[in-house]
Amino acid sequence: METLSPGEVVTVPASLSVSLNLNFGERLAGLPAAYAAGPGLLYRYGGRETSSVQLAWIGLRLTPLGAYQLLGMPPSDLAGHVVDVADVFGTGGRVLAERCRAARSHQERFALLDAFLLRRSAEGLRPSAEIVRSWQLLSRSAGRARIVELAADVGWSGDHLGRVFRRQVGLPPKTAARLMRLMNLLACVDADRTRWPELAAEHGYSDQSHLNRDMREFTGMSPSQYISRLRPCGCLDAAPKPPARSGQPGRDTSDSFKTVQAARS
């Protein structure tokens, strides 16, 4: 559960994944009740409500190659967009959202989602072996492998790798590498002991200004703002929020998220 106060805005940082989000609480202005958010997308919700809104989220985070296999479109078609699930999955997506909304528990909803995605997986495309290999190498390097090295490893030109990678992963290789490096850095952040220059150096940034630019692009925040505005769900307060008063609902503490991996080829 999540409570938005009047005018409150939440920032969702960019991610490598495609996220499927279903809201079973009150409707939120500006977002479909069930939607997919593309990879690399920094977006915000809230800010239009004149009274408090009670949201009830359940979501799935599809790994890039899992999304290529499960979606009704290449992840590149979703990059930079928030799209109603019916536009992604057609009538089946609309029916799924309605059935999930009518379900009485998250367990029942996850069962519906699992069954739906298993059917999609059986029918879906498989990512190419070269892109699977390139993704694995990039992941092992925490985003620090050079694109020319990835291309050479699979025997492709850099341009060809870039085109196929973007279609199947949803982002150009260099953008995916930058975002992967930042996500690995943020996983090491300790709010009480973080030393940003040291973290920047350890993760291959030329200096903290280099890190700051990526932070602004992918989270919309400076490093210090990120720390002070981070929610337990991984989203961010778009502006400082006054402390909760006694008895007031707290932050979103939902753990109702899954990560979907691509099936082995």
Image (cartoon, rainbow, N blue to C red):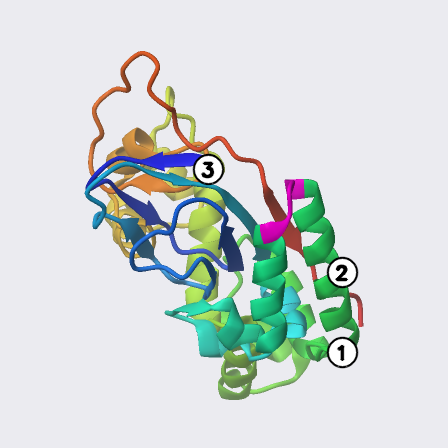
Numbered tag placed on residue 115 in the rendering: 2
Which of disc 1 and disc 2 is earlier in sequence?
A: 2
Mark 3 or mark 1, which has the lower sequence index?
Answer: 1
Magenta residues span 102-106
Find the distance from the CA under tag 3 to the CA under tag 1: 32 Å
Q: Is residue 60 found left or right of 120 in the rendered image?
A: left
Relative to 104, is 75 on the left or the right? Answer: left
Marks 3 and 1 close (CB-CB < 8 Å): no
Q: For the residue carrying disc 2, how many other residues have a C-alpha within 10 Å: few (<14), some (14-19), or many (20+)?
A: few
| Quadrant showing the C terminus | bottom right
Residue sitting at the far front: 102
Q: Position of residue 117 (x, y in %)?
A: 71, 64
Q: CA separation, marks 2 and 1?
A: 13 Å
Q: Nearer the viewer, mark 2 or mark 1?
A: 2
Q: Amino acid at mark 1?
A: Glu
Specify the label residue 233 is tagged with.
Answer: 3
Element under disc 1: helix
**Left or right of 115 in this view: 77:** left
Residue 54, compared with residue 21, is above or below; it is above
Check disc 3: other Cα within 10 Å, few if <14, some if 14-19, many if 20+.
Answer: some
Q: Amino acid at mark 2?
A: Ala
Asked whether the viewer can see residue 222, the reply is yes
Q: CA distance from mark 2 to mark 3?
A: 25 Å
Q: Residues within 10 Å of mark 1 (few under 14, many from 20)?
A: few
Residue at screen point 53% across, 80% down: 167
**Does residue 63 show up?**
no
- Residue appearing at x 49%, y 76% in the figure: 87
**What residue type is disc 3 on?**
Cys
Residue topped by disc 1: 123
